Image: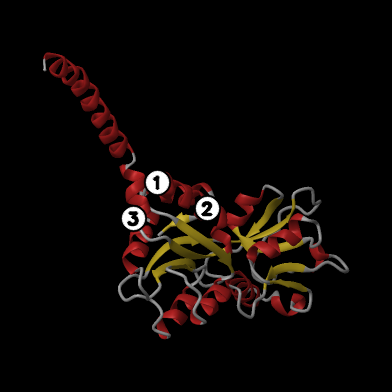
Amino acid sequence: MKRLRNLCARLLPAAFVSACLILSAAGMDRPAAAAAAEPEIVVFAAASTTNAINDIVALYAAKGLGSVKTSFASSSTLAKQIEQGAPADVFLSANTEWADYLEKKNLAAKGTRSNLLRNRIALVAPKDSPIGSIEIKQGFSLLPALGKDGRLAVGDPAHVPVGMYGKEALTKLGAWDAIKDRIAPAKDVRAGLALVEQGEAPLGLVYESDAVASGKVKVVGIFPAGSHTDVVYPVLAVAGQKVGPAGKFIAFLKTPEALAVFKKYGFAGI
């Protein structure tokens, strides 16, 4: 009996320590467990936000707040995909029109829409281009810089927001008619940017944030305020089963940490 009591005395502390270690490990994994408990959400975001959103999603995951998948394209393409049933939970648009479109289709969760960011339209050229600064003003022309055969790379003005803004500005400044047959329409702003980066187009219209993210182009002009509708990025939760988790991610996009990431890439807050 005495031997049995001594054995128990030796085993109890070891068992206690083991139990503590197990509990400690469970506590250390609590953020990961909490993240795992959150349903994964899907964010559909304008192509121009690619770099910033990817960084923010990584930050969100590192904080144990949840898992996020992303899809980037022109706002028009994404809105149409949502209309056709694509499993998106958050929509970040590069203009208000495509957010309006989803609201009219009753695909936006009520009370979740807000304006998140601002941007500017920039005229860019390849980094090693001899083209210097171009003063963008009433009556200016892009033809001298485009040369005989050059084209202006831009998101398709028929539906891509950057192209819609660009056409509006060029029309207002009296420069559209001269170059409307000299554009290289792209599926989204990043595709247009790539044409300039690769030297396939001497000039392109992109967002200022795209020029910041690229490093392969230079800004040769900024379209003045008033030449086009303000470039505003609205964000909303898509109507469905994950409005709560989507709202949580949208709230994170408005935190100082997330806004600092947007600022790093050339966006301005509202």
Query: Residue 39 vs residue 4: left or right?
Result: right
User: Which residue has dot 1 on it?
Assistant: 257
**Whole-number angstrom distance, CA of label 2 to CA of label 3:** 22 Å
> Marks 2 and 1: in contact by CB < 8 Å?
no
**Whole-number angstrom distance, CA of label 3 to CA of label 1:** 24 Å
Q: Can residue 181 be seen in this snapshot?
A: yes
In this view, 154 is above or below 68: below
Badge number at residue 119: none
Question: x, y percentage for residue 151?
Answer: 79, 68
Q: Nearer the viewer, residue 153 or 93?
A: 93
The kind of residue on which mark 3 rests is: Ala
Question: x, y percentage for residue 3?
Answer: 16, 14
Question: Upstream in the sequence, badge 2 or badge 3?
Answer: 3
Residue at 49%, 81% (x, y): give it: 83
Q: Nearer the viewer, residue 24 or 59?
A: 24
Residue at 79%, 62% (x, y): give it: 201
In this view, 198 is above or below 71: above
Q: Nearer the viewer, residue 86 or 184?
A: 86
The residue lying furthest to the bottom in this view is 105
Q: Can residue 224 be seen in this snapshot?
A: no
Question: How many numbered marks appear?
Answer: 3
Question: Upstream in the sequence, badge 3 or badge 1?
Answer: 3
Q: Splitting the image into 4 quarters, where does residue 169 fall?
A: bottom right
**Whole-number angstrom distance, CA of label 1 to CA of label 2:** 14 Å
Discs 2/3, front: 3
The kind of residue on which mark 1 rests is: Glu
User: Which residue has dot 2 on it?
Assistant: 54
Question: x, y percentage for residue 164?
Answer: 60, 75
Q: Kindly state the secondary structure of the residue where label 1 is placed.
A: helix
Residue at 43%, 48% (x, y): give it: 61
Badge number at residue 37: 3
